[in-house]
Amino acid sequence: VTRVTMRRYTDAGIAASIARGDPFDKAGAYAIQDARLGPVAAYQGCYCNVVGLPLWTAARLLGRAGLDITHITTTDLLPQCGNCTLR
């Protein structure tokens, strides 16, 4: 489980995001990694879980399926994966 705290938005910020078309290609109308909108004030848990795929969990499952994952390191993933609670 990842807990996400959204920041407060201004009407102008919402209008600008809509004008750019930002929310229309996202399942939840935002992306945690959206630098222009910067929608998230804080999160606790797995960053990649919010993006859509918890990479450490995926790596573990691939390992159980027989793939060699011993070479995967934090630098192979996202910078946020280094502190992941699923690691």
Image (cartoon, grey):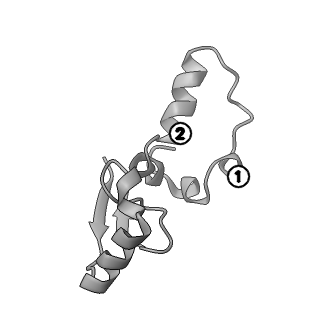
Looking at the picture, tell me which residue is in the foreground, 77 or 21. 21
Q: Residue at x 27, y 79 (%)?
A: 9
Circle 2 SS class: helix
Residue of label 1:
75
Q: Position of residue 47 (x, y in %)?
A: 45, 54
| Mark 2 surroundings: few (<14), some (14-19) or many (≥20) residues within 10 A | many
Q: Where's residue 82, x and y in %? A: 58, 55
Q: Is residue 46 visible?
A: yes
Residue 86 position within the rendered picture, expressed as x and y whole percent measured from the top left? 45, 44
- Mark 1 falls on what kind of element? helix
Left or right: 23 in relation to 10: right
Q: Which residue is mark 2?
A: 56
Of the residues under marks 2 and 1, which one precedes in the sequence? Answer: 2
Q: Residue at x 52, y 57 (%)?
A: 83
Q: Is 30 located above or below residue 13 in the figure? A: above
Question: Which quadrant of the structure image shows residue 16?
Answer: bottom left
Q: Tell me what residue is drawn at x 52 percent, y 24 percent.
A: 61
Q: Which mark is residue 38?
A: none
Q: Residue furthest right?
A: 71
Given residues 26 and 32, the one toward you in this image is: 26
- The answer to whether residue 9 is left or right of residue 79 is left
Q: How many marks?
A: 2
Nearest the eye: 10 or 60: 10
Q: Amino acid at mark 2?
A: Trp
For marks 2 and 1, give the CA distance: 12 Å
Image position, residue 76 (x, y; %):
70, 46
| Crowd band around label 1 with a 10 angstrom C-alpha radius: few (<14), some (14–19), many (20+) | few
Q: Residue at x 47, y 41 (%)?
A: 54
Mark 1: which amino acid?
Thr
